Image (tube, grey):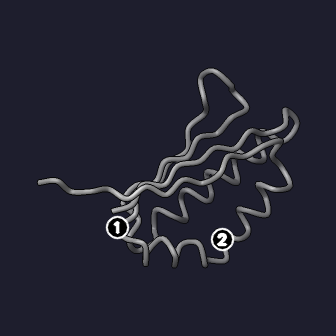
Amino acid sequence: MLIVTGSITARPESFEALREAALDHVRRSRAEPGCLTHSVQVDCENPLRLVFYEEWADRAALDVHFAQPGSGAFMRAVRDLSATSTRVRILPVVDRA
């Protein structure tokens, strides 16, 4: 399993449009094979910042997700609507059981 995290900070005038784009992206992603969890939250300390948390079954499922037209459209929206974004972090989960 892989955990993916990242965040986006909107400009005040673009927050609602970015939030809607993020919610659409989350809904699309949840329907993809291999998506275990996909969510977006508003940061309590910075109400213009959206934080993403995702869990994917494996790298192959994540690669297919990144190749989806909807993922590309979302990233274009991020570039157009955000003030800043963080690097996406992909963390492997090690099962120690």
Point out residue 65 in the picture as x, y percentages from the top left corner. Answer: 53, 72
Three-letter amino acid code at the position of disc 1? Ala
Task: Check disc 2 and give the amino acid type.
Answer: Gly
In the drawing, does residue 42 fall left or right of residue 95? right
Q: Position of residue 28 (x, y in %)?
A: 55, 65
Q: Residue furthest top?
A: 45
**Mark toward the start of the polypeptide (1 vs 2):** 1
Instruction: Give the residue at x 52% y 49%.
Output: 5
Residue 9 is situated, as x and y percent measured from the top left of the image, at: 74, 39
Q: In this view, does 3 lie above or below 83?
A: below
CA neighbours of label 1 inside 10 A, class few (<14), some (14 to 19), many (20+) = some
Identify the image quadrant of the C terminus. Answer: bottom left
Q: Would you say 60 lies left or right of 96 here?
A: right
Residue 44, located in which quarter of the rendered image? top right
Q: Which of 61 and 38 is in front in this view?
A: 61
The answer to whether mark 1 and mark 2 are in CB contact below 8 A is: no
* Residue at (34, 67) in percent of width and height: 57
- Which residue is label 1 attached to? 57
Residue of label 2: 70
Secondary structure found at label 2: helix
Number of numbered labels in the structure image: 2
Work out whether residue 42 or residue 93 is closer to the camera in this orientation and state it.
93
- Residue 46, labelled with which disc? none
Around disc 2, counting alpha carbons within 10 Å, would you say few (fewer than 14), some (14 to 19), or many (20 or more)?
some
Residue 34 image-quadrant placement: bottom left
Give the structural element (helix, strand or loop) at label 1: loop
Residue 1: horizontal and vertical position, in percent? Answer: 33, 62
Nearer the observer, 19 or 89? 89
